[in-house]
Image: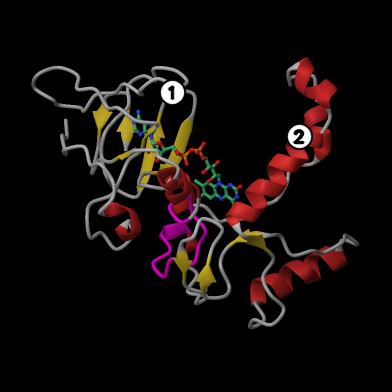
């Protein structure tokens, strides 16, 4: 937990809670970020959202065409698909259907970033099918949840990005130039991190870290905890 007065607990715990005066934020700490602890529901936002005047005029003028293309690409990469009819019936889904019907609303199953069949995904990573354990938000151990660890990060690595683990970024140097960062507690002042991404990583061998596919090939910043 990060509080204004300091840090409580492990810096590399899967859940990181930032407690501030005006807002608290829960994020996933690990290679994959909050996708490691989210529910994986991959719904597109209502297009009316983008009609709000808070968006830049250029974006509103453009309409949804480019956004729609972005959503399609993301859905493909995230393997977004509704819970299959061929799988066991889920009591929660049945209850949601019933409540929608009672309210006279349309029921539909949302697309989920979950793999329901063993196979190789868009990023070339082999994934196991979901075993319905229900641990999506506490870290998917079978590797069936389509977290960023399973798709965008391996894809970025395949395209030349360097993944720096257990480091803390303090500022970003700008497009096309190295990312500069520093490791907390480094005795000899900030040490530069060079690469396209700096991401956090749970401890090696941690069951919920699931970084085996990337570990050997990643450049790993030395651990410095403040
Ligand atoms: C319980 C829960 C359930 C959710 N369910 C859904 C859902 O079903 N569908 C949905 O669409 N969204 C859901 N979300 C929201 C969604 O997961 C997030 O919006 C999304 O993951 C944010 O992605 P991001 O890349 O912006 O940030 P993150 O995924 O949070 O990535 C940021 C990463 O950077 C690290 N970091 C931060 N500062 C530094 C620094 N200085 N140096 C180094 N590393 C740093 C963080 O530790 C984190 O790992 C859920 C969120 C939570 C908490």
Q: Is residue 117 above or below residue 110?
A: below
Q: Is residue 150 left or right of residue 50?
A: left
Tell me which residue sits at (19%, 19%) in the image. 190
Q: Which residue is under mark 1?
A: 21
Residue 209, given in percent of the width and then of the height, sits at 32, 56
The answer to whether residue 42 of the structure is visible from this angle is no
Helix or strand or loop: what does disc 1 sit on? loop
Tell me which residue sits at (57%, 64%) in the image. 114
In the image shown, does 10 or 153 lie closer to the viewer? Answer: 153
In the image shown, does 100 or 148 lie closer to the viewer? Answer: 148
Q: Is residue 78 above or below residue 3?
A: below
Q: Is residue 168 above or below residue 80?
A: above
Q: Verify whether residue 195 appears in magenta.
A: no
Tell me which residue sits at (67%, 47%) in the image. 73
Q: Which mark is residue 148?
A: none
Quarter of the view holding residue 102:
bottom right
**Residue range (magenta):** 137-150
Q: Which residue is under mark 2?
A: 66
Residue 111, given in percent of the width and then of the height, sits at 69, 60
Quarter of the view holding residue 46:
top right
For the residues labelled 1 and 2, the Cα–Cα distance comes to 37 Å
* Residue at disc 1, CB closer than 8 Å to ligand 1: no
Helix or strand or loop: what does disc 2 sit on? helix
Q: Is residue 91 left or right of residue 121?
A: right
Give the residue furthest to the right. 104
Residue 81, given in percent of the width and then of the height, sits at 67, 63
Disc 1 residue crowd, few under 14, some 14–19, many 20+, Cα 10 Å? few
Disc 2 residue crowd, few under 14, some 14–19, many 20+, Cα 10 Å? few
């Amino acid at each position: 937990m990060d509080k204004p007065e300091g840090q409580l607990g492990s810096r590399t715990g899967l859940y990181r809670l930032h407690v501030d005066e005006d807002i608290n934020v829960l994020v996933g700490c690990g290679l994959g970020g909050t996708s490691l602890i989210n529910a994986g529901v991959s719904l597109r936002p209502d297009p009316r959202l983008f009609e709000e005047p808070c968006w830049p005029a250029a974006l509103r003028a453009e309409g949804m065409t480019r956004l729609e293309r972005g959503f399609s690409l993301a859905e493909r990469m995230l393997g977004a698909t509704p819970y299959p009819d061929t799988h066991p019936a889920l009591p929660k889904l049945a209850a949601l259907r019933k409540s929608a019907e009672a309210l006279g609303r349309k029921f539909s199953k949302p697309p989920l970033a979950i793999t329901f069949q063993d196979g190789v995904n868009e990023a070339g990573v082999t994934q196991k099918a979901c075993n319905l354990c229900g641990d999506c938000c506490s870290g998917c151990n079978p590797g069936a949840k389509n977290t960023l660890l399973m798709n965008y990060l391996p894809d970025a690595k395949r395209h030349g990005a360097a993944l720096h683990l257990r480091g803390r970024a303090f500022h970003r140097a700008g497009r096309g130039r190295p990312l500069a960062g520093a490791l907390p507690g480094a005795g000899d002042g900030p040490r530069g991190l060079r690469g396209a991404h700096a991401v956090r990583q749970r401890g090696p061998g941690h069951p919920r870290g699931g970084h085996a596919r990337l570990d050997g090939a990643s450049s790993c910043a030395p651990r410095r905890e403040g």
